[in-house]
Amino acid sequence: MDIAAIIDRCERLYRDLDLSHVHEWKQRTGGKAIGHMPVYVPREIIHAAGMLPVGIMGGGDDIEIIRGDAYFQSYICHIPRSTVELGLAGKFDVLDGMLFPAICDVIRNLSGMWQMMFPGKLVKYLDFPQTFNEVGRAFHRFEMAELALALETLSGIAATPERLNRAIALYNDNRRALAELYDLRAEHPQQVPTAELYLLLRAGNVLEVAEHTALVRAYMQQARRRQRALHDNVRVVVTGLFCEQPPLSMVRAMENSGCYIVDDDWVLGARYLLRDIPVGPRPLEAIADAYMTDTVATATRYVDGDDKGGYLVDQVRRRRAEGVIFAAASFCDPALLDRPMGQKALAEAGIPHTAFTYSENTGQVQVIKEQAGTFADSIKLWGAAA
Amino acid sequence: MNATATHAPAVQKEESMVIQKKMIAEHFETLAQAGQSRRKVVYTFVPGNLNELLLAFDLLPVHPEVNALQSGMRKLSGDYILEAEKQGHSEDVCTYVKCDIGMLKKGNIGPTGEPLPPPDLLLLSYTGCFTFMKWFELLRQEYGCPVVMLQIPYQADGRITAGQRDFVARQLREVVVPALEQLSGRTLDEDRLRELLASSARAEDDLVHVWESARHKPSPIDAYFGGVYYIGPIFTAFRGLPGCEDYYRSLRREVDFRIANGMGPTTPEGELRQQKYRIVVEGPPNWTSFREFWKIFHDEGVVMVASTYTKVGGLYEQGFRHDAAHPFESLAEYCLGCYTNRNLPSRVDLIAKYVEDYDADGILFNSIKSCNSFSAGQLMMLRELEKRTGRAGAFIESDLVDPRYFSAANIKNRLESYFQMLEARRAAA
Ligand code: SF4
Ligand code: SF4
């Protein structure tokens, strides 16, 4: 497959709100499928229990919200509306269960709504620890063991240590491939346009892990050989988009505004762990422990100590970025409450930044493009945001 | 969020109100003198607060949500919120946080006009609301003081599991107590803690009697507008103290007196004896137009017979009591049991039960614009409740402390049609 074909496949998967790929996978394998909301869930456990993890990230700008609006008040982000819309339209009937990680009160309450809407299905809220000490570790190990049990009961396949270790190895490999992809883009942003990288990431929401890793590698192999001119663009990190996703048109608009995006936090769950999970005799504990340390910093995760914003500053330095764009879904409390702390850390480090909000179905991409363009120009002209 | 009002509108003074007023004035005076008296100050949140534990170490609690609601009632919150927005806070987020930060930026003047002391410790009791975590991350930057995180798992399956209780109790023993010992320079006196917990339980008994009095017709209390005063001492810095017990004893006496005399609750507009409709309310009140809001209902002869907001600091009437025999387990259970820590199906169950127990005519949702913890999913809850109880529901939107989001005309219009609907249903019945 050449790059165009790979990206075309990814875009078709991205636009496939009917989850036909999941239908096919189930038919082909006879297995079950488990949906999960952003940011992070331990997909290794789902895989080891013989099921397909399916990342659900709202409806983008491809669906009209008819019923979803009747479920939510006006001042709330968009992703729960489109998720409910898709659920009520039967698009998730193919999923045998749904996981709701603890990232904010909207996703938390959505888990209860799901219990009421789909009483026959497995609905599980994953209460990730915010206490990164031994007490938190014990709690998290216990929770992961409960999750494994619930999944095994559903699939009838035991997540044995062997199966868990195999899943760990596959996902380690996937994270390595994605890390390489991110490094490649940061090194040669002209070879890896962000819209392509984004679509590749999104494909990982539905493809089986090994297939996805192979696709990412096939893409990289060809992207490295690509001959494309490097423009005089400004290198930026984009942050705050860990849950509700911007429409593809917005991703493209940002990139066409004179910016090279050299790091970001969309589809963050796939890259949440910064190191390999060790394979070994107690794989379930290893999965739980990996969450406790060696992960990205993000707004939905408590930062102990006074290093708030430190991760972002490091990210900028590591990627040799010249500025940061804070892009948050409208009404997203975690991202928007976190923003001033990130801005403060950047200001202290002398790193320019700008901010805007969006929603998954935003039509205002021109405004966003202009803002990103002005930001890029100001960095080029003065080395700092105007 | 979550707490109660202390600056009562000019209502007819009763003994309990006098006690509460005095207690609060003394507390803020003590806070204002914390610097001189060298007493250590701990900021912490109302839901699932560990008041008895803090008192056992002789620490002084401050509740930022209470300051925010006070600012709302004193019409200062609008300016504070604008100040925070000027400093870069988004228009879209929880206004309690912005009100608190704006107040801090403008000198941190407390409700009695004296400056509040800065915290020596932020006790992040992370219960029932994600925003709490962000709030204290922000305050940590402002004050540069340590934070202790106490994570309370969510009752996602509608019950408290043994694992959850152990997790909280272990955090209390292994993380919170050592931090408080270090701060206060003394070791925990468990006997003192038990005494405080036993006192809490006595006050809780009296409060339950007060809530349950709303079964009477006419109801001697308003469990929402009046209720926010009733929860004042027990939800905040006083639970465990003799003054708190006095308050609830005297409140109970007053309620019993009203029952004996067939009286309604005392409201700013006088006694509400002619009660036309009985309503259960979900969601916090609006503080900036509190009295105006209350009057709309008073004028229609509506009495609130139960509310969920008054349960954010504990569901005592569902059986929970602080237990001196099991201090840590009972504190853990208390934290886990708060209303906003319950999943949506159990919130629906509880409201349906209130409708039944208190023979309510309808259900009102006051959906708070900036509070996802309460509001996300409320429309679905309402539909479910209408289906289950057959009672009529109303849904209005306002905010806790942002006056820009209280549209009196809109709310009035909506409520008028709601009252007409109640009338029509009654006529048809
Ligand atoms: S966009 Fe933000 S507020 Fe909305 S569900 Fe996601 S994390 Fe929560
Ligand atoms: S989101 Fe709601 S519960 Fe949380 S702090 Fe704000 S007002 Fe309180």
Image (cartoon, rainbow, N blue to C red):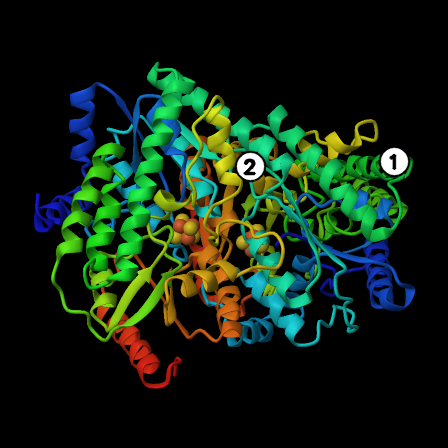
Label 2 amino acid? Tyr
**Residue B111 at least partly seen:** yes
**Residue B428 at least partly seen:** no
Tally of numbered discs: 2
Q: Is residue B134 above or below residue B155?
A: below
Which residue: 49% across, 39% down? A291
Which residue is tagged 1? B190
The yes-or-no answer for disc 1 within 8 Å of ligand 2 is: no
What is the secondary structure assignment of the residue under circle 2? loop
Label 1 amino acid? Glu
Which residue: 49% across, 28% down? A144
Quadrant of image for the N terminus of chain B: bottom right
What is the secondary structure assignment of the residue under circle 1? helix
B102, A12: nearer the viewer: A12
Q: Is residue B48 left or right of residue B134?
A: right
Q: Residues within 10 Å of mark 1 (few under 14, many from 20)?
A: few
Q: Which label is found at residue A106?
A: none
Q: Is residue A36 above or below residue A322?
A: above
The answer to which quarter of the image holds residue B25 is bottom right
Q: Does label 2 or label 1 sit earlier along the sequence?
A: 2
Q: Contact, CB < 8 Å: mark 2 with mark 1?
A: no
Q: Is residue A97 left or right of residue B29?
A: left
